[in-house]
Amino acid sequence: MKYLRLLILILSLTVGLIAENPAELDSLFEQGNRAYQEENYPEAIRLYESIIARGYESGPLYFNLANAYYRVNNIGYAILNYERAARLMPNDPNVAFNLQLANLSVKDRVEAPPPFFLFRWYQNFLNLFSTRGWAVIFSILLLIAASSFAVWLNLDLRRLRRGIKSLFIVSGALSIIVALILFQKYRIETASDFGIVLSGTVSSLSAPQAGSTELFIIHEGTKFKILDSDGNWLKIELVDGKQGWVLSADVAKI
């Protein structure tokens, strides 16, 4: 089920059973950081990637990995991991600055049109907290609503019952609103609708087959939206509206 992971996160937060990161992963992360500080960037990349290969991800992990790729001038992978870090840490100024800096090296300087101001405000509101942060808020509101409802059912004093009932209604309504925000935020953080070009030069074709008409060329680090897939091919769209098919081996989903 699509939102099963999110449901597990909410339940674990509600009952206070958030697990700590395994010590082995912490050790690998620290080893990667030391390798980076010693300017052994290939080793840092190997260690960071080994953590991701075990199914763990975090904003700081992707950010450090992106920095290491940038140091070895692998712009495609650097931008890919900066984008992944930005997805998990949307308000981090260091991530935003480094991503902007890496994008200066991209040959395809396709500028996106500015978003509608209401959409921009809504995005800023969503980015006030990560998925985990919104899950904590939802868990607290849900706990308040459940507790006030239980007290309201068992309290005899009429005046206090009215106040408790009001608390239950307000906290219940807020928990529903936050739940909707939480699912939207989770969908954004886990979406794979965008990708980054990893190969130096990639031809975008008119059809998902070799030998079809070349429509345009894109270069390493270019960001695109994924519209469709067909076997080993992806149909993509650039921010200026150009569409075409590329081999999935030449790109990666954010």
Image (cartoon, grey):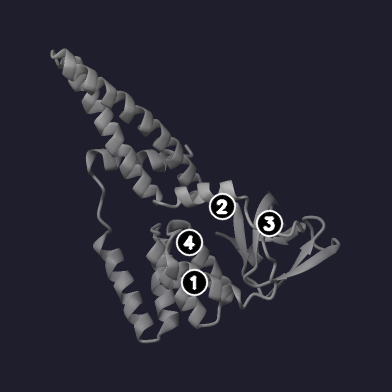
Expressed as whole percent of the image width and height from the top left, the position of residue 249 reads: 64, 64
| Nearest to the observer: residue 71 or residue 145 | 145
The dot on residue 192 is 2
Give the quadrant of the C terminus: bottom right
Residue at position x 81%, y 55% in the image:
207
Task: Tell us which disc is closer to us: 2 or 3.
Answer: 2
Residue at position x 33%, y 70% in the image:
29
Mark closest to the chain's N terminus, 2 or 3: 2
Local packing at callout 4 (Cα closer than 10 Å; few below 14, some 14-19, many 20+) is many
Give SS at disc 3. loop
The dot on residue 232 is 3
Mark closest to the chain's N terminus, 2 or 1: 1
- For residue 17, what is the image quadrant? top left
- For the residues labelled 1 and 3, the Cα–Cα distance comes to 34 Å
What amino acid is labelled 4 in the image?
Ala
Q: Which residue is mark 4?
A: 86
Q: Which residue is mark 1?
A: 97
